[in-house]
Amino acid sequence: MESLAESLPIRLTITSQIQQIAQEQGRTLVPLTDDLALLESGLDSLCFAILVARLEDLMGFDPFTSSDVSHYPVTLGDFISFYKNAAK
């Protein structure tokens, strides 16, 4: 089981990028909680495309292209876990 310190960098990177993109795109975010449905976050599809591209630049990988995705993340917690699992 990973420690909070190990999981924090990915979580912090994702949430800070979400906040930055929302600001740049003039979007209003709701509070970012693990059970937040991504479609209800306040971001649109362009924002998510920007997010995935930026995360690939920052982390050096794109879990959507580097794995066999059987289902896409639905909540913010799923999205963060998806990146954490791909980083292992």
Image (tube, rainbow, N blue to C red):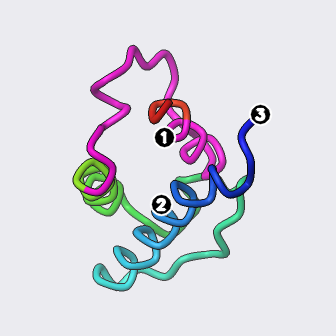
Upstream in sequence: badge 3 or badge 1:
3
Quarter of the image holding residue 65? top left
Residue 72 lies within the magenta run:
yes
Label 2 – label 1 distance at C-alpha: 9 Å
Label 2's element? helix
Amino acid type, callout 2: Ile
Whether tag 2 and tag 1 are in contact, CB under 8 A, the answer is yes
Residue at horizontal 73 percent and vertical 54 percent from the top: 4
Please tell me whether residue 46 is drawn above or below residue 26 in the rendered image: above
Q: Residues within 10 Å of mark 2 (few under 14, many from 20)?
A: many
Percent coordinates x, y for residue 71 in the rendering: 52, 23
| Residue matched to label 1 | 83
Upstream in sequence: badge 2 or badge 3:
3
Percent coordinates x, y for residue 5 in the rendering: 67, 57
Query: Residues in magenta?
Result: 58-84
Residue 49 lies within the magenta run:
no
| Residue matched to label 3 | 1
Whether tag 3 and tag 1 are in contact, CB under 8 A, the answer is no
| Residue matched to label 2 | 14
Amino acid type, callout 1: Tyr
Disc 2 versus disc 3: nearer the observer: 3
Label 2 – label 3 distance at C-alpha: 21 Å
Residue at horizontal 64 percent and vertical 68 percent from the top: 32
Amino acid type, callout 3: Met
Residue at horizontal 77 percent and vertical 33 percent from the top: 1
In the rendered structure, the answer to whether residue 85 lies left or right of residue 19 reads: right
Please tell me whether residue 46 is drawn above or below residue 6 in the rendered image: below
Label 3's element? loop
Label 1's element? helix
